[in-house]
Amino acid sequence: MSDHDYQPSSKLGKWFNDRLPLLTLSNHLAEYPTPKNLNYWWTFGGILTFCLITQIVTGLTLAMHYIADSDLAFASVEHIMRDVNYGWLIRYVHANGASMFFLAVYIHIFRSLYYGSYKSPREVIWIIGMIIYFLMMATAFMGYVLPWGQMSFWGATVITNLFSAIPLIGEGIVAWLWGGFAVDNPTLTRFYALHYLLPFLILGLVVLHIWALHVPGNNNPIGIDIKKPSKDTVPFHPYIVIKDGFALLMFMIVFAFFVFYSPNILGHADNYIEANPMVTPAHIVPEWYLLPFYAILRSIPDKLLGVIAMFAAIFVLVILPWLDTSKIRSAVFRPLYRQFYWILIIDVLILGYVGAMPAEGIYLLVARVATAYYFIHFLIVLPILGYKEKTIPVPLSITEPVLGGSPNLGIIKNKKSLN
Amino acid sequence: MKKIISITYLIFLLLIGSYQVNAAEKTDLIKIDWSFNGLFGKFDRGSLQRGYQVYSEVCAACHSMKYLSYRNLSEKGGPEFSIEQAKAIAASFEITDGPNADGEMFTRPGKLSDKFYMPYENDKAAQAANGGAYPPDMSVLAKARGGGANYIYSLLLGYEDPPSGITLDDGVYYNKYMYGNQIKMSAPLSEGLIEYGDGTEASVEQMSKDVTTFLMWAAEPHLETRHRMGFKAIVYLIILTVLVYYSMKKIWSRIETEV
């Protein structure tokens, strides 16, 4: 503990802190030794915390004006947009905030995939993260239902109907989810209740996620274990705080651009038509962040197998720490993995694209190939790669490559390729 | 700094991508350089007032606008009729109110706080009067169609004789921008259909442009505030980002690592 540690000076503060050391928790957080070579891909954890809090605060405000009733929901959203003071701003921040949240979470996840942050000893951080991601998808899906537009209604119908694929009890489960025999008012009210609840579960899991992170400490771009604290680390405050703050501001500029200048570009126009059970939209598409999974679902001709494949696509991520057999964490030292990594990214982007297109002809074929490759990557390529790949020697410490001149990863890569 | 640029570039690519996915729907629409587009986009006040005239004299016969009130017509950022004008517009409609102390419904002249007059009692009545097709409510119509304002403008100008080989049922019209090319609304606008109060020539293009502008405002009544606030917010964020960037450089210069 250093000299500038905060210690409560008042009697009451000391008395309280002896019983619950909440006041000196900040010392731990401020001193938390962080690898000094973290790049900007590591700033998305802080950005995600910002996203979650933004969603909770704007959501709370919207909840004060929104009415969860199938006859009134659409009108209450219009009331928010027109008559509530700055209601349009709050709603657009909330609606685009969901997209920004997913943009950030995908970057966060793919950063983890590149640098092997899911590997021992960080498996629990990764699994908690995957649960958060799954809950985020559930929350976002239910939130999209609340404005009770055409896409809300038909999206809810399609997704809840997936459960009817379960043999024997499927139909019963769907009726139980709906609270009736079709998506209707009971569905809307329960989705509202759950949409309000889940973010707080996510918040709790985020605390666990960070707690679990603070046990082994951050991974880093060269993926080696470092001594903490040491020459390789910097205290979280002020170094990481200011860097995260800078990245957050950059992110907020993009966010603001969407909110103020293209607030509806990420949504579907049909959701400004009030829900009508009698009229089915020409194409039912989910929000962009669910499209890859939607493509996997539709690529399989059998409904039950399609549902299983969709959930399996998430589940392979959960067990990823055991599928990837390589002991080397960072892709910087795994030349082959690096190539497969980029192929996976392209594969997921293709899945997202075909998910937005009608499931027919060439799109269906592409979706099938991309789905197959997705599973091949995780179930076949990763386990084999760990044994077959010739990796590049890993430096012993972060400062070691500095001896060559600069700690930049580009230098390491060049140095290695020269050898 | 290189990494910052690459991150920004990636996000930029995503932005472009989302624009293009959206653009795919509106490929052959007529594109207008609307005054309300862009960083400082504002509605053309005269166009909004004329657009209201087109709506009230033509569209309102069938299309409701149930989320708008007469007071909106005099609010800032909209057509900005004077309070007196808006009051006069409201008073020209007979609104059903009640029940009164005797339990009877009664009619009275409209007030600023009233919602726009509904042309039909209910959706069924609207359908019955329009050959089974429901004339959609126009409150958010400009946001409820892929292509938005350009789509509505194109549709109004898209009426044509059907190509040979296509026979249309009674009460169905050919429109090259309509989904499936068949529309149950006859061409609503014709040369000189209305007489503009400000003397503008009422060509079909002019009326289409005015009413589309009006519908865009109806769907997004706070668009001007949004654009103004957005510009300030983004300028503020950029300045703050630059300041934080230099603070970060300074702080990190204490150790020999680059940020």
Image: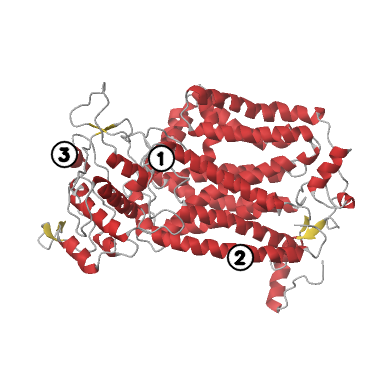
- Label 3 sits on residue: B129
Cα–Cα gap, marks 3 and 2:
58 Å
Q: Is residue B13 left or right of residue B216?
A: right
Q: Secondary structure at mark 2?
A: helix
Using the image as rendered, state which of residue A54 and residue A69 is in the foreground: A54
Quarter location, residue B111: bottom left
- Distance from the alpha carbon under mark 1 to that under mark 3: 28 Å
- Residue A278 in the image: x percent, y percent? 30, 34
Amino acid type shown at disc 3 = Ala
| Number of marks in the rendered image | 3
Q: Residues within 10 Å of mark 1 (few under 14, many from 20)?
A: many
Q: Nearer the viewer, mark 1 or mark 2?
A: 2
- Going by the numbered disc 1, the residue's amino acid type is Met
**CA–CA distance in space, label 1 to label 2:** 38 Å
List x then y, in percent, for residue B75. 31, 64
Circle 1 sits in a helix, a strand or a loop, which is it?
helix
Which residue position holds label 2?
B240
* Numbered circle sitting on residue A237: none
Outermost residue on the bottom side: it is A10
Quadrant of image for the N terminus of chain B: bottom right
Quadrant of the snapshot with the C terminus of chain B: bottom right
For mark 3, give the secondary structure: helix
Q: Do marks 1 and 3 both belong to one polypeptide chain?
A: no
